[in-house]
Image (cartoon, coloured by chain):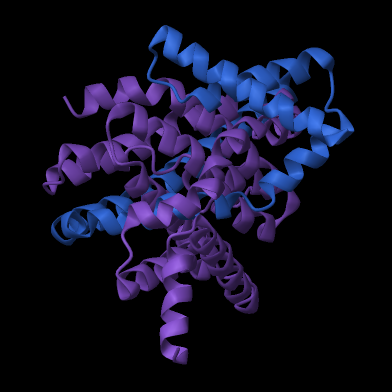
Chain colours: A blue, B purple
Amino acid sequence: MILKFIALLLVCQLVGEAFVVWTGLPIPGPVVGMILLFVGIALRGGIPQGLGWVVDGLLSHLSLLFVPAGVGVMLHISMLREEWPAIVVALVLSTVLTIAVTGLLMTKLIGWVQRRRGED
Amino acid sequence: MTLDFALGDIWVYLSTSPLLHLTLTVLAYVAGDWIFRRSGQKAFFNPVLLSIVMLVTLLSVTGTDYPTYFEGAQFVHFMLGPATVALAIPLYRHLRLIRQLWLPILASIVLGATVSVSSAVFMARWLGASQQTLISLAPKSVTAPVAMGITEKLGGLPSLTAALVVLTGVLGAVIGAGVLAVVRVRDDRARGLALGLNSHGIGTARAFQMSDVAGAFSALAMGLMALTSAFVLPFVLRWATG
């Protein structure tokens, strides 16, 4: 039954939100809910078929879900008019750096792990 | 009663009902997605970016304010929470990849996340961005639902974060392959990991165009990035913004 798994997602989120309010940690409640669901699945040792369907349906159009918030930039247009050069430069530079550093480190470490395994 | 007057009546009725802006949100996304597919799935024609531009233009032209729009759009927005919880499933599916390469993956995620946050925050601060912008900018590489949650908790602007996250995703998907070629990274596992870490879901879509291996590593990087950032970023940011 599909409804059962929708309820499961909501319960995980609700517990996550309650946990965050209770502890006062600066972590989003749904992320705590995600960890709860993850631990549950890991303990169970697999994903129930119905849950897989619900999740794939929900996530197949995930990017639609951040459109309403994104439209909210219209509230900050005057601020953006002043700060856009700083934002654009930071985004471009940080993207180039992040991709280069991550890709290079991962390549080096894969090579290192494989060489070590070859020697063992 | 003239036709003009009747249309005016209908408009007054519809514009106060949440249904209108809910429908417009979904329609704008469908249109954006159609353009994206027609372009041959080029990252530049990102459906989210297109629909945000369409909706902001429409709201400005009709003189509609954001709270009125959000009364309808909130039903879509609300689904972000359950969707974030649901991200546990793809993360679990891709976790088997970690078994052989856990050290390279975890080390690259930690260093990549540090570079992503610190380079953006330091550069923007140096160029005079406000504190609120810095907070909103910091989680730019984290998948949007989690990034917005982080920003909200830290006193930034979730809506600005949503736009910056999408921009970062598009930017990485467009220039990522070129950057990786310049620094001579050819391993698909490394290429996928780098794209997913910087550009979350949008980078993952691009990585799947390279190969299934790159796509899987990208999806894994996106999940781990979201998880680590939610816990580590508040503390890194407190340090970086002094």
Q: Residue visible at 24% across and 39% down?
A: B134
Percent position of residue B122, x then y: 21, 39
Task: Assign the N terminus of chain A to one quadrant of the image.
Answer: top right
Percent position of residue A108, x then y: 54, 36
Q: Is residue B29 above or below residue B232?
A: below
- Name the image quarter holding residue B151: top left
Q: Residue visible at 83% across and 36% down?
A: A2
Percent position of residue A100, x then y: 44, 47
Q: Which of these two is toward me, A103 or A34?
A: A34
- Name the image quarter holding residue B69: bottom left
Task: Assign the C terminus of chain A to one quadrant of the image.
Answer: top right
Q: Is residue A56 visible?
A: yes
Q: Is residue B199 shown left or right of residue A15?
A: left
Q: Which of these two is toward me, B45 or A98?
A: B45
Q: Is residue B51 above or below residue A76?
A: below
Count of marks, rendered view: 0
Q: Which of these two is toward me, B3 or B135?
A: B3
Q: Is residue A53 above or below residue B69?
A: above
Q: In the displayed image of the protein, which residue is found farthest to the top?
A: A23
Q: Is residue A96 visible?
A: no
Q: Residue visible at 55% across and 70% down?
A: B32
Percent position of residue B239, x then y: 23, 22
Q: In the displayed image of the protein, which residue is found farthest to the front?
A: B1
Q: Residue visible at 25% across and 53% down?
A: A87
